[in-house]
Image (cartoon, rainbow, N blue to C red):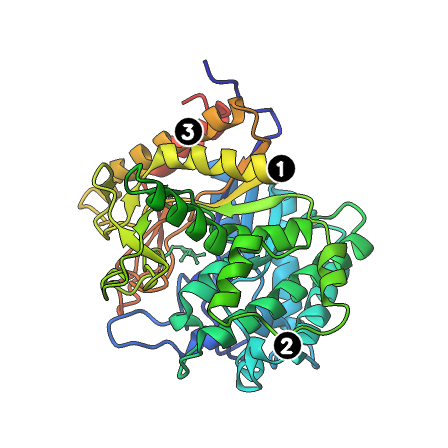
Amino acid sequence: TPKPFPNDFLWGASTSAYQVEGASESHGKGPSIQDLHHPADLSDFSVASDHYHHVEEDVALMKELGLKAYRFSISWSRIFPKGKGEINPEGVAFYHTLIDRLVASGIEPVVTLYHFDLPLALYENGGWSNRETIDAFAQYAKTLFQEYGDKVKYWLTINEQNVMINHPAAMNPGKTPTNKELYQQNHHMLLAGAIATNLCHELVPEGKIGPAPNIIAVYPKTCKPEDVVAADNWEAIRNWLYLDVAVKGVYNPIAWAYMEEKELVPRMEAGDMDLLASAKPDFLGVNYYATATVSAAKNDGHDRAPRNGDQQTMVGEEGVYRAETNDLLETTEFGWQIDSVGLRTTLRRVYDRYHLPILITENGIGARDALEDDGTVHDAYRVDYLRRHFEQARLAFSDGVDLIGYCPWAFMDLVSTHQGYQKRYGFVYIDRQEKDLKTLQRVKKDSFAWYQNVIATNGSR
Ligand code: BGP
């Protein structure tokens, strides 16, 4: 029988600033790269879930749900409209209001410093290719630690840095960076994460900080030894590259060999590796949606799989590894594979490598939820998905993994990165369609009551 979770287990839920807040062009906020996305068939980010104007109501719902933790991100360009320099006091005040309400409601705030929304002014100045962005990030992080450090204990540096490198389209509006440039940006983001980690330890005495990459176990398609090597390679390139630098301060050797072969090794300055080695995270955030399956590359022009645009879909790289479908897994209506057991495998692998506490910072199912005539949303598929994943998380915990909490994606419906409001993740439904804002009313889905029970019984339901 699996062990019960500890009493202080952080049952939570996640969101990110640009996907829920709205008010993206008002209240002193400067534009971020995400505000450039206004594709005709998607909701834009100017209203999103209008969380900016519903903070009181939203936190009341979190309290009703029984959340022990709420993971959200701060919008960099709401604090520094131009990414650096002048501060927007209204933005600073907004997060004080949110954090104060969370704390007053007994909910632990878990703050991501940066979740995909690079300030546009920095992007126009070269973005992460320019080392000046590291300094801007340091200034921003320092400001947040000084401002909120007495109320916020848990911090995450950068959300899904590996997704930003491996699926760069949504992060580089109007540009198509080469892989060489992306790995240079990656190095700069790693330095930025290290600086933020050290600053947190200096400025927030009780502070705990870690990265939040998207980590998934990679399966070989068959037990053919070459397929196993390909799976190991891709795991090193997409997972361990990021965590090895963050935790051990070294570049992963397999990923490094790949970078050398492909001429992706970044330019470094004296002191860079010392800085990376000096930063020690206290825990690891893990975003998990599904495992990946690969086979040895055939280099026949078909190693890459066709993608439907979103960031979780397997890609493959010609001559490096071939993207495969795992025929043994079900998929969601958006084509994402569902692998709850893979969560256990992933957690075990991460813990085995790093021996650091793990917080699941994202996991969930995107669906075309519909508001029924009876005024509710019957999302039995979400309950089923989460129930199975929670069970596996508990098994991983029983295996010895130091799992400290679980924050499903998402607390409320929000703008999905590629499918806008067509794809929903929340426990709370937001009454709006793609273009049509409707009432923006909050409606508890069936999964809300179910999760409430899970939390109340500490995961035994
Ligand atoms: C992660 C991101 C989130 C969220 C989630 C679901 O990669 O950190 O921001 O969007 O995936 O993805 P999507 O919205 O594409 O369905």
Crowd band around label 1 with a 10 angstrom C-alpha radius: few (<14), some (14–19), many (20+)? some
Q: Which residue is mark 3?
A: 392
Q: Is 296 in front, or is 196?
A: 296
Residue 434 image-quadrant placement? bottom left
Q: Quadrant of residue 447?
A: top left
Above/below status of 105 relative to 252: above
Looking at the rendered structure, the kind of residue marked 2 is Thr
Counting from the top left corner in percent of width and height, residue 360 is at 51, 42
Q: Which mark is residue 133?
A: 2
Q: Which residue lies under the disc numbered 1?
A: 357
Task: Decide: is 304 above or below 26.
Answer: above
- Quadrant of the frame with the C terminus: top left
**Quadrant of the picture in which ligand 1 is shown:** bottom left
Type of the residue with mark 3: Gln
Q: Position of residue 324 (x, y in %)?
A: 26, 50
Task: Tell me what residue is drawn at x 77 percent, y 59 percent.
Answer: 199
In this image, 73 relative to 344: left or right? right
Tag 1 secondary structure: loop
Disc 2 to disc 1, C-alpha distance: 30 Å
At x 51% / y 25%, what residue is drawn?
A: 458
Is residue 368 shown above or below 420? above
| Disc 1 from disc 3: Cα separation | 17 Å
Tell me if residue 200 comes above or below residue 108 in the rendering. Answer: below
> Who is closer to the viewer here, 440 or 141?
141
